[in-house]
Image: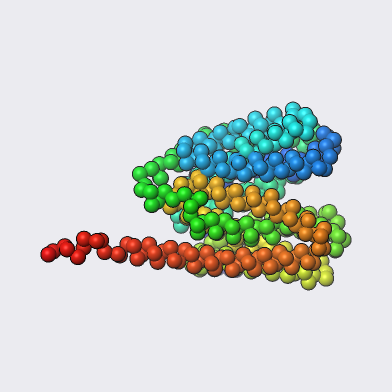
Amino acid sequence: MNPIAGIYHFYVDSFRGLAREVWLLSLVTFINRAGSMVIPFLSLYLTKSMGLSLDQVGWIMSAFGAGSILGSWLGGKLSDQFGYYQVIALSLFSSGLAFIGLQFMEGFLSFCIGVFFLTTLNDSFRPAMFVALRNYSRPENRTRAVTLVRLAINLGFSMGPALGGLIITTLSYKGLFWVDGISCILAGSLFLLKLPSKDGIADIKGKDSLFRRSPYTDRTYLFFLLATVVITIPFLQYFSTIPLFYNAFHHMSEASIGLIIAFNGLLIFLTEMPLIRWCERKGYSIYSILAASVVFFILSFIFLEMAPVVALLWVGMTFMTIGEMLNFPFMNRFAMDRSDQGLPGAYMAMFTISWSVAHIIGHNLGMHMVEAMGYTATWYVFTGMLCVGLVMIYVLKGMVRREKEKETEQSIEPSPTSGFEGS
C-alpha cells in the first residue's frame, strides 16, 4: 500500500466504530451551531441597528455570560431529574422561539433580559448533549465521540459567520434572528424524529450513595475544573487579544488575520480525529496527553514572545492548534468518566460552567493586561499561567492515584467479625 492510500485508510478508520446515534447527535449539534449566526454579529447589531453605546454592549455581553452559566447549571440539573432527552428537545425548540422573539426587543434593559433568557435556554443544551453522548457511545469510544461533536461545532461556527454575513447583505440583521430560530427548531425536529430516547436517569437509579457522588463535594473533580479554567484562559487569547497583537505589532490586515484563524479550524477538521485515534492506539495515559497539550500551548506563546517575522506566527498557531486538539477531547473524556461515579448531568454542567467562567474572565483579563503592561509582558504572564496548569495536571494525576489506592485498601480490608469466623 502506498503512503497516500495508507494515510487515507487511517483517516477513514478513525471515524469507524461510532454509533449511529453519535453521528445523528453531531448532525443536530452542527445545525444548531451553524444556525447561531446572531452571536458573532451581536455587537455590530447593537451599535449599528439599535444605536447602543459600547458600555451598554458590554453589559449585554455580561448578561450573555450570566445566562450561559445559569443555562449550563439548569441543563445538568434537569437532565438528572427528567432525563437528557427532554432537556435537549426543550432547549432546541424554546431557544428557537427565543431567537425569533429577540428581534422584537427594544431598548437596552429589555434586550439585556432577552439575551439572558435566550442564552439560559440555549446553553442548557450543552450538558444535556454531553450526557446523551455518554449514553450513546461505548466507554472506549467516548473520546472520539466527543471529538466528532467538536468537529461538528467547529464546522458550524466556521459556516455560521459566512452565512450570517450573506444574510445581512441580502436580507437584513432581522433575517439573522429568523434563520437562527428556524435552524434551532429544525435541529429539534431532527432530534425527536431520528434519535431514540435512552432515559438519561435510568443508568443512575438503583446506585447506592457511594456511586451517586455530587460534583460539588468531589474535591478531585473541583481541582480538575480549576485546572481547566487556568489552562483555558490563556488559550482564549487566540480569539481576543492575539488578533489585536497581529494587527498592532505585525501590521497584519483583517484578511490575513482571518486566514490564520481559519487555518486553525481547517487543521482541526483535517487532523483531530486521526490524532485522537493515534493517541488511543498508542495507549498513552490521559495525563500524559493533557500534559503534552499544555506544553504545546506554552510553545505557542513562546513563539509569540520571540516572533520577529509573520512566518513564526503560523508556527505558533500550529502549536496552539495541536494543543487544542489534544487538550479538549481528553478534558471532556475525564469529565465524562468522572460522571460515571455520580449524577452525570451535574458533572457535565460543572464542566461546561468552567468553560463559561474561563470565557467571562479570560477575554476581559487579557484586554486589561495588554492595556496595563503591553503585549510582551502579557504573553509572559500567560506562559507562567500555563506552567501552573502543567503542574496542576500532575497534581491531579496524584490525587486520582491516591483515590484508587484508598479504594483498593478499603476493598481488601477485613471485616470486624472476620477473625471469629470458623472458631
Report if residue 254 is visible in the image: yes
Residue 265: give x, y in percent of width and height.
69, 55
Q: Which quadrant: the N terminus?
A: bottom right
Q: Is residue 57 left or right of residue 392?
A: right
Tell me: residue 125, above or below residue 394. Answer: above
Residue placed most toward the observer, 87 or 33? 87
**Residue, far left:** 423
Q: Which quadrant: the C terminus?
A: bottom left
The structure's colour scheme is rainbow
Residue placed most toward the observer, 415 or 279? 415
Tell me: residue 61, above or below residue 369. Answer: above
Residue 157: give x, y in percent of width and height.
69, 47
- Residue sitting at x 74%, y 27%: 104
Quarter of the image for residue 309 reads bottom right
Tell me: residue 218, above or below residue 165. Answer: below
- Residue sitting at x 48%, y 47%: 344
- Residue sitting at x 65%, y 40%: 67
Residue placed most toward the observer, 270 or 107? 107
Residue 135: give x, y in percent of width and height.
46, 46
Report if residue 19 is visible in the image: no
- Residue sitting at x 52%, y 54%: 335
Q: Is residue 390 left or right of residue 197?
A: right
How many marks do you count on the picture? 0
Residue 108: give x, y in percent of width and height.
78, 34
